Image: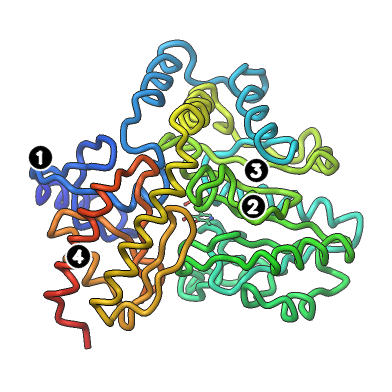
Amino acid sequence: MNNAEIATLHSEFVMGTYAPELALVRGQGCYVWDADGRKYLDFGAGISVCNLGHCHTGVTEAIQRQAATLVHVSNLYYNENQPRLAAVISRKSFGGKVFFANSGAEANEGMIKFARKWGASRGKHEVIVMQRSFHGRTLTTLAATDKPKYRDGFAPDMEGFRFVPLNDSDAVEKAVTDKTAAIMLEPVQGEGGVHVSDRPFLQFVRDLCDQRDMLLLFDEVQCGVGRVGTLFAYQHFSVVPDAMSLAKALGNGFPIGAFEVAGKWAGVLDKGTHASTFGGSPLACAAALAVFDAIEREDLLFHCRKMGEHLKGELVQLSQKHTCIREIRGLGLMIGVECDSPVADIVTAAAANGLLVLTAGETTLRLLPPLVVTPQEIDAAVAVLDKVLGSRVKPA
Ligand SMILES: Cc1ncc(COP(=O)(O)O)c(C=O)c1O
């Protein structure tokens, strides 16, 4: 089937909650191909999912091997891959215990349940969250997400979330009540426009949580698993949370989510308090084990930091030529290009020129190439943006 035929079939049978324009049929490394045979440089990586590039050999082989051995067992039984993966996450982070889910929203939902359970004996249930946050589309994670448009029509909101501006210590302190169980944030906000937390702010909220008996929860669904040049984003800031959620790049495209809880709180969710049928299946965990293996073997954290610097440098140069660019921000290979007007037309024009990029909010272009990206691929992507911005008729 070609692009048009797939689009027709899709619109007839799939709910219209998304608005795709291309049908992608194959991927390799930093490239994908559409159903009409056109090749694209993918600077979205499935929205920070395919961090090792498309169809990474190590992950593909691990999935194939495990798929031929044992795909699924329920959590009524042990499966060796689950504790092996939990051990890798724990040893490479803050030594906690892990619960496995299937997506970012489900991981966050579980992490919020953990905070509520922790707070129940203390008479606390509220969570302070940040403006411009995105935590998912389930009813609870939606209530923690600062995008009223996403909540339209789904009232009433789950109660108990208070929004404050990111990096505003005074506002956070003022929002704390005797009902506050936790502060939850993305160390680097993704959907909200690629906004990076200040280190002193994160240290402030860490100290505040310790002083006022609250939990610090980090949503690393988008910024974790190498994306910002450290394995977990909190490591860049040297501020350790009480719990952290992961998903997206954890399986390099195979669905898996997780949240890790610090050792001292690992018993809060005890027997029977939380569950997920598919969570931590042998197959999903095999994919994620291969991801951590590849990140280490290919020295991808160092490479990510180097490529991030290169990409930022090129974009700064581009901003001197194109005055519609207001700011370049981000960390590692999670980069936002803030423009002076909506950027949807740039995304469309870039795709027409063989480059896939994302938006983050109305006026920010978001670049999330696979961490294996080369300097030549970065230069090629920036050349497309240069061309697109040069011939652009700015939207009114
Ligand atoms: C920071 C963050 N949290 C949670 C989610 C939700 O993840 P999922 O779409 O896998 O449910 C996303 C998705 O973009 C995200 O960026």
Q: Which of pointers 1 and 2 lies earlier in the amino acid sequence?
A: 1
In the rendered image, which residue does mark 4 sit on? 348
**Residue 377: image x %, image y %?**
24, 48
Q: Which residue is drawn at 58% across and 39% down?
A: 101
Does 108 sit left or right of 351 as displayed?
right
Q: Residue at x 91, y 54 (%)?
A: 121
| Residue 167, quarter of picture | bottom right
In the rendered image, which residue does mark 2 sit on? 234
Q: Which of pointers 3 and 4 lies earlier in the amino acid sequence?
A: 3
Q: Which amino acid does label 2 sit on?
A: Tyr
Does 255 sit left or right of 206 as displayed?
left
Q: What element carries label 3?
A: strand
In the rendered image, which residue does mark 1 sit on? 1
In the rendered image, which residue does mark 3 sit on? 259
| Residue 396, quarter of picture | bottom left
State the CA–CA distance, disc 1 to disc 2: 44 Å
- The answer to whether the residue bearing label 2 lies less than 8 angstroms from the nearest atom of ligand 1 is no
Find out whether the residues at labels 1 and 3 contact each other: C-beta distance under 8 Å. no
Q: Which amino acid does label 1 sit on?
A: Met
**Residue 364: image x %, image y %?**
37, 71
State the CA–CA distance, disc 4 to disc 2: 34 Å
Report the label total.
4
Q: In this view, does 246 lie above or below 68?
A: below
**Residue 269: image x %, image y %?**
78, 41
Closer mark to the observer between disc 4 and disc 2:
2
Q: What residue type is labelled 4?
A: Thr
Q: Which of pointers 1 and 3 lies earlier in the amino acid sequence?
A: 1
Closer mark to the observer between disc 2 and disc 3:
2
Circle 2 packing at 10 Å, graded few (<14), some (14-19), many (20+), is many
